[in-house]
Image: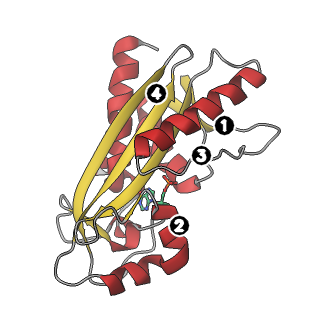
Amino acid sequence: MATLNFLTGNSGKLAEAQTLLGPLGWEIQSFEVDGKVPDVIEPQSDNLTTVALAKIAQGVELLASQGRLGESLLVEDSGLFIDALPEFPGVYSAHILESIGCDGILRLLDDERTAYFLTVAALWTGEAVEVFVGRCDGSISAEIRGDGGFGYDPIFIPDESQDGRTFAEMTNEGKSTFSHRGRALSALFDYLNVDGA
Ligand code: IMP
C-alpha cells in the first residue's frame, strides 16, 4: 500500500481523505514532526491556490529538514463561497466560522441561498508540486442540521443531495462522493495512478 502524508491540523479533512483514498490502496497518514502536526503560516490572500501553494512550500521545507524529501506530501485549502455575499466567507472561511459561526451565516441570508465549496489541493510528489481543484455546488440550508462532518457542513446542502440533507447529515463516504474535497482528491488519485508518482 502506498503512503501519502497529509499536512493538516483538521481531523475531519484527514478522515475524509482516508475514507476516500484508503479503499483505493492509499494509506493517508498525518504528517507530523516530533509527534505533532507542524504549524504552517497561511498568507493573507484572496486566492485559495496561493494559500495552498504557500502551505506546500512550507511542507516541502519541513520534509527536507527531516531528510524525507523523496516522500509525497499533501496540503489543501478550502472555502465556502455564498453567491448573495460575494467573496464571503471565501478565503476567510475559517475566520468567519470562528467569529460568527454557522448561525451568523444563516442570519445574513434571505431568499438567495446558492453557494459552493472549493478545495485546492497541492501535492508534492517527491519531485514536483501538482495542483488539483474540486468544486461542489449547493445551497445554504434554512437551519442548522446534522451532527456529522465539521465546519460549515451543518448548513450546506449539495445539489446532489437526494433528500435535502446537509453534509453533516451524511456519512463521510456519502459526502466524499460529490464533495469539493472528494473531487479534488479523486483527480489527485487519477493523477497518481496514471503517473505512478
Ligand atoms: P481551511 O481549508 O482549513 O482554511 O478551511 C477554511 C474553513 O472552511 C474552516 O473553518 C473549515 O472548517 C471550513 N471547511 C473546510 N472544508 C470544509 C468542508 O468540507 N465542510 C465544511 N466546512 C469546511
> Distance from label 4 to label 3 (Cα)?
21 Å
At x 33%, y 83%, the residue is 108
Left or right? Give the position of 142 relative to 131: left
Which residue is tagged 3?
A: 8
Q: Which of marks 4 and 1 is in front?
A: 1
Q: Is mark 3 within 8 Å of ligand 1?
A: yes
Residue 155 at x, y = what percent? Answer: 34, 73
- How are the residues colored? secondary structure
Which label sits on residue 95?
2
> Distance from label 1 to label 2 (Cα)?
24 Å
The amino acid at mark 3 is Thr
Mark 3–mark 2 contact, CB under 8 Å? Answer: no
Which label sits on residue 25?
4
* For residue 164, above or below residue 23: below
Which residue is tagged 1?
A: 31
Q: Which of marks 1 and 2 is in front?
A: 2
Q: Residues within 10 Å of mark 3 (few under 14, many from 20)?
A: many
* For residue 194, above or below residue 50: above
At x 54%, y 47%, the residue is 14
Q: Nearer the viewer, mark 3 or mark 2?
A: 2
The amino acid at mark 1 is Phe
> Mark 3 vs mark 2: which is more N-terminal?
3
Q: In what element is the residue under mark 3?
A: loop
> Mark 4 vs mark 1: which is more N-terminal?
4
> Distance from label 3 to label 2 (Cα)?
17 Å
